């Protein structure tokens, strides 16, 4: 296995062991200079000319290709823009349009709420008997019936890290005549994904988690190449138009994946992401996966030995777990705040999940042991049992 650790390419605050790259990746070292350059040399000097001269308009597709490489998408099948919630809506709407005789979106109760909320908004708008049906994650396979228009699943569960079998679920959806939409929020940059081989119609994901694009980094959408010229984008903004600068009064979708663009791209965020993606040059996701599993197995073993009262909330079988490990603890919120104050940053997900992300690009086994020592101290000495750790912040 090739070593994937490239800690020297990231800025990590002194004394911090960062186990939250699954929520917001740290900043690659080269990003500030790149942003300064975009601001000082491009925005300031080129002004509106930057759209052509600095290539701002082409960036959503170019960056889409570098993200696409990590998720097994062919060049030209991924484009960046908007936020993940918006891309979920777009994929669902396009999928629904492909099955006009059907009315049901199927998802599961382990999905990230925003995906479900976006589906609720869409079926509410459509009316006419459209419905979002949610079942337990283990029930999805047997719930893919022939009234389902779109199956929408998040591959890696944000709380437990449980992984859906992408090829198998996609095949079940297709056998039932449904369109398959995958959310790769906790997959891209975390585990190997082969979108092309899965044959799914759509996939979406964000880039501020494992891809380190920074807070507010643009999301991505993948459309299977054979559908890219017919999928209806639903969010018919001018930059998805075939000829935006014709200022035509009517919408004509653009060629291929470009039609999934909506409005003006966030140029500064896109530049930060483009720079952050360079960290992945030459990285093979199979190596990342192997390193991630090794770190997770070490963490589980050491935590269970040091703190038996923490209950594993993630699948024990590493082949069905993403790149995070979660433990259940009644006072998980307070415990996580106490752990964070001691330099080990994970996060908390209601009602009782302490979540730790493993990102081999900037974590090694020494970090894992040091993190476990802090968790052990907090737990065995009940350091969490302090009123100051029980006040909930806006973001947990
Ligand atoms: C992180 C995440 C989101 C967040 O959506 P944004 O629009 O980027 O805020 C949505 N869905 C899933 C599955 C996520 O993990």
Image: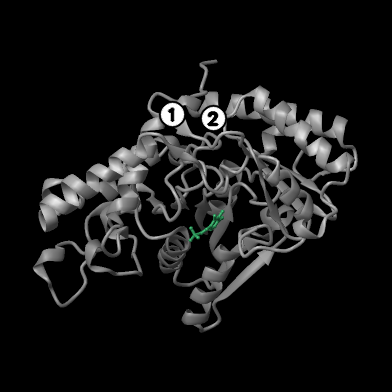
> Can residue 76 be seen here?
no
Picture coordinates of residue 162 (x, y %)? 69, 45
> Coloring scheme of the render?
one colour
How many numbered dots are placed on residues in this image? 2
Picture coordinates of residue 191 (x, y %)? 55, 36
Q: Earlier in the sequence, mark 2 or mark 1?
A: 1
> Can residue 364 be seen here?
yes
The image shows residue 350, relative to residue 344, as above or below, that is below
Q: Is residue 282 left or right of residue 145?
A: left
Does the residue at mark 2 contact the one at mark 1 (Cβ under 8 Å)?
Answer: yes
Q: Is residue 75 left or right of residue 358?
A: left
Residue under numbered circle 2: 362
Label 2, label 1: how far apart the Cα atoms are: 8 Å
User: At x 15% / y 77%, what residue is drawn?
Assistant: 249
Give neighbour class at mark 1: few <14, some 14-19, many 20+ (Cα, 10 Å).
some
Q: Is residue 301 left or right of residue 18?
A: right
Which of the pair 99/152 is nearer the observer? 152
Picture coordinates of residue 204 (x, y %)? 46, 53
Query: Dot 2 lies on which element?
Result: loop
Picture coordinates of residue 312 (x, y %)? 81, 42
User: At x 85% / y 42%, what residue is drawn?
Assistant: 379
User: At x 44% / y 48%, what residue is drawn?
Assistant: 214
State which quadrant residue 255 falls in: bottom left
Identify the image quadrant of the N terminus: top right
User: At x 23% / y 42%, what residue is drawn?
Assistant: 37
The image shows residue 272, relative to residue 317, as above or below, that is below
Which of the pair 150/67 is nearer the observer? 67
Identify the image quadrant of the C terminus: bottom right
Give neighbour class at mark 2: few <14, some 14-19, many 20+ (Cα, 10 Å).
many
Residue 9, disc:
1
Query: Dot 1 lies on which element?
Result: helix
């Amino acid at each position: 296995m090739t070593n994937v650790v490239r800690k020297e390419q990231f800025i990590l605050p002194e004394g911090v062991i960062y186990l939250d790259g699954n929520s917001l990746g740290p900043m690659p070292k080269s990003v500030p200079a790149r942003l300064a350059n975009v601001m000082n040399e491009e925005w300031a000097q080129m002004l509106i000319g930057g759209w052509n001269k600095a290539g701002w308009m082409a960036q959503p597709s170019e960056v889409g290709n570098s993200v696409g490489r990590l998720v097994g998408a062919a060049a030209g099948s991924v484009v960046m823009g908007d936020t993940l919630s918006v891309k979920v809506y777009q994929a669902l709407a396009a999928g629904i349009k492909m099955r006009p005789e059907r009315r049901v979106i199927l998802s599961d109760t382990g999905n990230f709420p925003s995906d479900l909320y976006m589906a609720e908004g869409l079926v509410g708008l459509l009316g006419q008997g459209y419905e979002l049906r949610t079942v337990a994650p283990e029930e999805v396979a047997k719930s893919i019936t022939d009234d389902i228009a779109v199956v929408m699943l998040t591959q890696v569960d944000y709380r437990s890290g449980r992984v859906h079998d992408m090829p198998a679920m996609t095949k079940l959806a297709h056998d039932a005549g449904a369109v398959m939409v995958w959310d790769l929020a906790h997959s891209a940059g975390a585990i190997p994904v082969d979108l092309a081989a899965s044959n799914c119609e759509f996939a979406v994901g964000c880039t501020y988690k494992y891809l380190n694009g920074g807070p507010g980094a643009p999301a991505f959408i993948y459309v299977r190449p054979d559908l890219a010229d017919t999928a209806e984008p639903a969010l018919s903004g001018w930059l998805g138009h075939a000829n935006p600068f014709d200022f035509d009064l009517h919408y004509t979708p653009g060629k291929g994946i470009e039609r999934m663009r909506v409005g003006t791209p966030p140029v500064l965020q896109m530049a930060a992401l483009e720079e952050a993606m360079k960290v992945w040059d030459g990285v093979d996701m199979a190596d990342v996966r192997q390193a991630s599993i090794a770190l997770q197995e070490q963490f589980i073993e050491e935590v269970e030995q040091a703190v038996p009262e923490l209950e594993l909330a993630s699948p024990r079988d590493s082949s069905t777990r993403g790149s995070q490990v979660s433990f259940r603890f009644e006072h998980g919120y307070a415990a996580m705040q106490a752990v964070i104050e001691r330099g080990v940053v994970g996060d908390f997900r209601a009602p009782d999940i302490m979540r730790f992300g493993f990102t081999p690009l900037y974590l090694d086994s020494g970090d894992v042991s040091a993190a476990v020592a802090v968790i052990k101290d907090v737990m065995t000495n009940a350091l969490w049992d302090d009123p100051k750790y029980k006040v909930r912040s806006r973001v947990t």
